[in-house]
Amino acid sequence: MGLIVQKFGGTSVGSVERILNVAQRVKDETDQGNQVVVVVSAMGKSTDQLVDLAKAISAAPNKRDMDMLLSTGEQVTIALLSMALNEQNLPAVSFTGWQAGIVTEPVHANARITTINTEAVKNQLAEGKVVIVAGFQGITENGEITTLGRGGSDTTAVALAAALGADKCDIYTDVTGVFTTDPRYVKSARKLQSVSYDEMLELANLGAGVLHPRAVEFAKNYQVRLEVRSSMERVEGTVIEEEATMEQNLVVRGVAFEDEITKVSVLGLANSLTSLSTIFTTLAENHLNVDIIVQSTTEAESANLAFSIKTQDLMETLKVLENNKGVLNYEQLDAENQLAKVSIVGSGMISNPGVAAKMFEVLAENEIQIKMVSTSEIKVSVVVEEKHMLKAVEVLHQAFGLNKEA
Amino acid sequence: MGLIVQKFGGTSVGSVERILNVAQRVKDETDQGNQVVVVVSAMGKSTDQLVDLAKAISAAPNKRDMDMLLSTGEQVTIALLSMALNEQNLPAVSFTGWQAGIVTEPVHANARITTINTEAVKNQLAEGKVVIVAGFQGITENGEITTLGRGGSDTTAVALAAALGADKCDIYTDVTGVFTTDPRYVKSARKLQSVSYDEMLELANLGAGVLHPRAVEFAKNYQVRLEVRSSMERVEGTVIEEEATMEQNLVVRGVAFEDEITKVSVLGLANSLTSLSTIFTTLAENHLNVDIIVQSTTEAESANLAFSIKTQDLMETLKVLENNKGVLNYEQLDAENQLAKVSIVGSGMISNPGVAAKMFEVLAENEIQIKMVSTSEIKVSVVVEEKHMLKAVEVLHQAFGLNKEA
């Protein structure tokens, strides 16, 4: 007998029929003698509907009010799933975030979990009940309702699994696992049996989208064994654990990609030593996320700087830079959009120094120009023109042998 | 400067436009220098939608799960109203039932308020904020979410007004006040300037429908000054207080009525002494509400008994009586439906003994047969055929001078 945390996202609980399907997946686990904690998101588009209501009232609603509003979405799901399980004579109890003891820092809209008081959940498990917990939400020490921001339900599930010492945390989603690249765009994409936390972290950050990076980081820190699997199809998923099985000793495990990237260039920076930190501090203060940063010092007196952002942040970024031109002390701004980021990820890179070189070579052979480069220990990212994105993914996917069966 | 509790029902907050209208009504009070606590219900039909979802999953959902589900309705409204007020630069804070310190007995679906810990609400009022509280819901001492049953938001408002020592509790609704009878059916119905708690209690119990009897009882016990008024039209409402102003010294203050009544007769009861209590205990145990009871002992050896119920409870009532025939020891059951109850209400009756006689006389003059009679100190109810109901209401309304301007 084990303790399993299951997490079902919005699509998986998007209708009454799907909630009944989830109830069956829960029953499968209890039938095998396992204790189960289920974490659920709000039903399908219900969060969007709540956001629309809020926007009809205020262009920029108070964050506390938004948390109050949005946290009702998961509460509806836990109540309905509990009804579905109790209807099947499987004793179940539903808990809001605060009832499950999920304490967060005092920040609205994007709070981090600080503690979980597991007593109430443990008591109900001990009574033989399935415990259903509202994802995405918590409570501050002062009794304020908070939400965890994007990917919040994943984080709730992993944090609960860690706090309860669960044997496993299954993340049910609308795909069957983690793939070598996005199967919607690349036909030869294959599902991976396993990936390491670090690989998943890079893949999650790079838009693979099946699992939120915060949740992966949490799982890595607390060594929670994760599995990403389908809520619809009854097939094996992808296991995320410390040491992933080396499939065919693959150096590269996946190819991730993301479009709508813009490269911003700041030219003629007078004093690169201080202006560099000033620029990124200013952007951060304005909640603008910068991804790849490239600095070139061609002349003694001035430097050029380039960084990539999401295209949707372009207007705001230029405004901030222009408003601070006096402080930042640069000559000119330049922006190039319709770009994309393509990345190869794999723990094996650490001991295989030729991987980046091979990537550049493959792209050059296919006449795909590289605009920017960024590397980490287990990842190489390049920025290319958007129109070359899928071609780049395909040739890299093949060149690193990801299309072959393990 | 005073402290005012305002309560807005589901129709009054049924859309974004109506929530903005409510925000304006709140602002009217703060503009006059008053502190305001607002209690709101779930938006329009949202509770019905949640009930439909539950019914699609379970024919008889667990009550704890239903409370978990339904309490989200008011939480949505408080968040949206708070956004609307904050958008108008009127500082506001929203509280769920548990955040507002509304503690109930540990009963789901129909809990009574036991205590209100007003500290959080008082602190926010002291900071100059409008406090918005979710009606209809509370929390047990063990942290379980409960709901208060029908009319729950009225009760929340009155209980908060009592606990906070508010100067007034305004119940906003879709009518402009309490009328001498239902203005939808009787054209000459007039709005009353004031009624006493006891009169309102009889009117509320008799289907006048504007205010829940539990809330009126609470208001009477704690001497909370109530006013029923329109959320749409800016006109004076009806004040409910201990000593209502005597308008033209009217003995009768209102005529209430209710259709779909059935009279059930139990004939040939062997031992009326014990069987009477046995019958009503059995019905109560099956949650069947009996209204008027008439007992006649024509013979020494057996007795006949008649009582009125809502027609919707007829099948269930007959089933319970038949299942218990052995214990109850009667000869025969009889049921007459398509009946209605018409009542006259007024505190003045206590010192005017001829009121019931006049009522019977007026009905007789109009050839309306009386099937059953019930009297209290301030009320006389008769059961008549449903087809005579509105005629009876009209002739009584006129006979007791309710159609004349005060």
Image (cartoon, coloured by chain):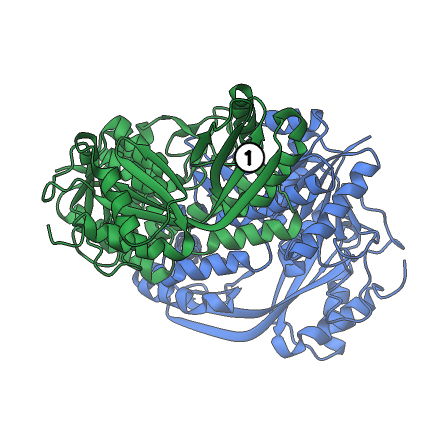
Chain colours: A blue, B green
For the C terminus of chain A, which image quadrant?
A: bottom right
| Residue B339 place in picture, x, y as percent | 44, 50
Residue A345, placed above or below residue A313: above
Q: Residue reaching furthest front?
A: B299
Residue A18 lies left or right of residue A293; in this view the side is right
Q: Residue reaching furthest top?
A: B273
The amino acid marked with disc number 1 is Val
| Residue A302 place in picture, x, y as percent | 42, 65
| Residue B110 place in picture, x, y as percent | 48, 35
Residue A123, placed above or below residue A9: above
Judged from the image, the secondary structure of the residue bearing numbered disc 1 is strand
Residue A3 lies left or right of residue B170; in this view the side is right
Which image quarter: residue B135? Answer: top left
The one nearer the camera, A260 or B73, is: B73
Q: Residue at x 36, y 46 (%)?
A: B207
Crowd class of label 1 (few under 14; some 14 to 19; many from 20; radius 10 Å): many
For the N terminus of chain A, which image quadrant?
A: top right
The one nearer the camera, A298 or A129, is: A129
The one nearer the camera, A91 or B111, is: B111
| Residue A390 place in picture, x, y as percent | 70, 74
Mark 1 belongs to which subunit? Answer: B
Is residue A196 visible in the rendered image? The answer is: no
Residue A179 lies left or right of residue B84; in this view the side is right
Residue B317, placed above or below residue A376: above
Q: Residue at x 44, y 33 (%)?
A: B293
The one nearer the camera, B47 or B324, is: B324
Label 1, on which residue? Answer: B266
